[in-house]
Image (cartoon, helix red, strand yellow):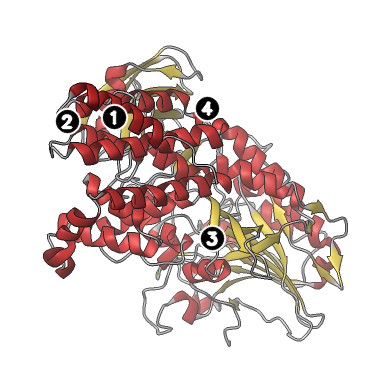
Amino acid sequence: MSNNIPQSVLSDALKNVLNGRKVKCAVFLTYMFDPGFFELYVLPLLFDRTFGQEDNIKRALLDDAIRDIEDIAIFYDYNGLVSESEPATLNYNRFSLRRNGIFHPKNIFLLIENKSEDGEEEFCDSLIVGTISANLTQAGWWYNVESAHFHEYIEEDAYLEKDNLISYLKMLQKSIKTDENILALDNILKFLRTLSQRQQASSNGKYFSKFYNSKMDFNEFIYQCIRPHISECNLEIISPYHQNSSDPSLLKDLTTDPAPVETRIFLPMEDMNTIAIKKEYYDSVSSLKNIHWSTLPKDILNDTGSNSENDRFVHAKVFRFFNKEKKWDFQFIGSVNFTQAAFQSVKGNNSNIESAVFVDCSDNKIEPQWWLKKLKNEEIPKEFIEEDENKEKSSDQILPLLIMQYNWQENQLKAWYEGDPGQLSCKQNDIEILIIKIKEKEKWQLLSTSDADIIKERLKSSTFIYVSDEKNRFARIIVQEIGMEAKPSLRDELSPAEILQYWSLLTPEQKAMFMIQKYQKLLLGKVTELKQSHHDDYVVSIFDSFAGIFHAFGHLNEEIFNNLENKKENPAKILLYGKKADSLPVFIDQVLNNESEEYVEDYIKLLCARESYTQAEKKYPEFVNKYLSHHKDIIKKLNNLEEIKKNLNFSDEKEKIRFLEWFEESFFMEVKK
């Protein structure tokens, strides 16, 4: 059988649909989550640049790059953290969700900025929605056979499933336990509301795509989309997990009234000799009329297309209805396994949250062919799994939902617990680091400052916490972090002169090269030729001079105010109120605490810093008011320069006072153009 199945590497598909455009906001939904893999191999795909190969340098460069994205949010199942994963280190939102079933969707939502066709500096937005079967794991993105569909929604266009998407994201919004608004969700919902709702389901004989949001049973969604055509179609079912009961009621429902002409079901394998379903389920399906166990082509199951026994795990979920003569090809792609929990709507007690998309892939020039090949009896192994290995851990083993939230700006730690009041033991590396005494169920509880200090210190090495209760229920959680602009950089501190040089650089590429050279020295023990030769002299001779100081602050202010003018608060927030290596508060503390005895230069640097905050107050008061307490603390530091002033050498103290009063008044005087 010739292979006519469209194929692509998932990361390449994402890069192709982005096509070098700027991502404004990003939301990822997944059941299983590997933070380390996501940060090193998925997150870089959102940028039209490279970050090198060395992990520490890559993370440090990404720590800078992601500030240009307004918000990134990951939503994953409470029990879905990959056991061997590396901890999360970068500044993006991470939220665990829990329900009676599981949180099982796999989606990518990317709000994109597009340049106008005439090349002018005006932009329109679009939304890329990826509906996929792959978890945010190494297996999902690199090794498994998965399925995916990407669709782009253009501003002010009309879409049939707009309301389905809005309802889905609002359901997600209501499920989150956090003190902060999720900007990425807010902005994506705002964009979707600009779209008009298309009334017709098809145009020119082809159906529009439609999004499935778990608000109805999945088979009902299939019927809603293509019921009139089912009796004339063949059906292919690709799913790694099945109902696994002696009565295949789900299959009967899907293949009866109306009944497809023929149905082929991919036979999932545990290994080359063991079928990954129970024997009673296999036998009951085999007894049904016009339904056949089948397999995918060998070149899809195996990377080399050889007869090697190392077949890839098929994790794709596809329900495909097609008619060769009429050239119909209707596909349902997403996270929905062929199980009762997946097919039931969210109204069901043990139902999952799922997502899928209906896509009409019909092409009047192409006759669709079977993807699956029927298996002969002699090709089918005789061994079956004895237990359903897809079952979750027993609910009496899993700790009820616990959210630990640390605020970097306020040094505050809160906890929200779904279980009854009692004590929770928190560990890292098998060492108990604190005990949380839960006082009230399902309420935010502010923990002590000492607890906050412990978590703050622990977050520098790992975001993972192992939590257990008095009933020996346990969970591995990621601490939810907010106010992350105040979280220290992954990179080492820069000197004031290095910060000034960094601010003065014009492009992201120049800044990246500057940091790579520094990281190579600090992290890898490598010293580049540039560092060895004239770089240090260059820093001292140029960027500690008055011209260098004014030049650097000119670039810094331009970057801050351009971002605020374009309503991009995140990079401005980091520069004005953050604790990153190039944040202005860090620069101020470095100047105030250094021992260089270059008092005149330090005095000018701090006056320039004060001018940056003064201009922010005048031009963007609403933005400043959001961070008013931090703003006031910084201004208080900058208004108290007596220690520096007393070290400025003048022959006459009174003359020094008069001169500095005049100088500061002139320095802050607004120049009239």
Closer to the camera: disc 4 or disc 3?
Answer: 4
Report if the CB atoms under discs 2 and 4 are less than 8 Å apart.
no
The 10 Å Cα crowd at callout 4, few under 14, some 14 to 19, many 20 or more, is: few
Residue placed most toward the observer, 370 or 303: 303
* Other-residue count near label 1 (Cα within 10 Å), few / some / many at <14 / 14–19 / ≥20: few
Name which of mark 3 and mark 2 comes first in the sequence: 3
Identify the residue at horizontal 37%, vertical 52% (top origin): 64
Q: Nearer the viewer, mark 4 or mark 1?
A: 1
Give residue 484's position: percent from left, percent from top.
Answer: 40, 37
Q: CA distance from mark 4 to mark 3?
A: 29 Å
Regarding mark 4 in the picture, which secondary structure is present there? helix
Q: Quadrant of residue 58?
A: bottom left
Q: Nearer the viewer, mark 1 or mark 3?
A: 1
Amino acid, disc 1? Phe
Note whether 229 is above or below 586 in the view shown. below
* Image x and y of residue 408, in percent: 36, 31
Q: Is residue 319 left or right of residue 453?
A: right
Query: How many C-alpha atoms fall within 10 Å of the one at disc 3: few (<14), some, or many (≥20)?
Result: some
Q: Earlier in the sequence, mark 1 or mark 2?
A: 2
Residue nearer the viewer, 434 or 405: 405
Indicate which disc, 2 or 4, sits on the residue closer to the N terminus: 4
Location of mark 3 (residue): 22
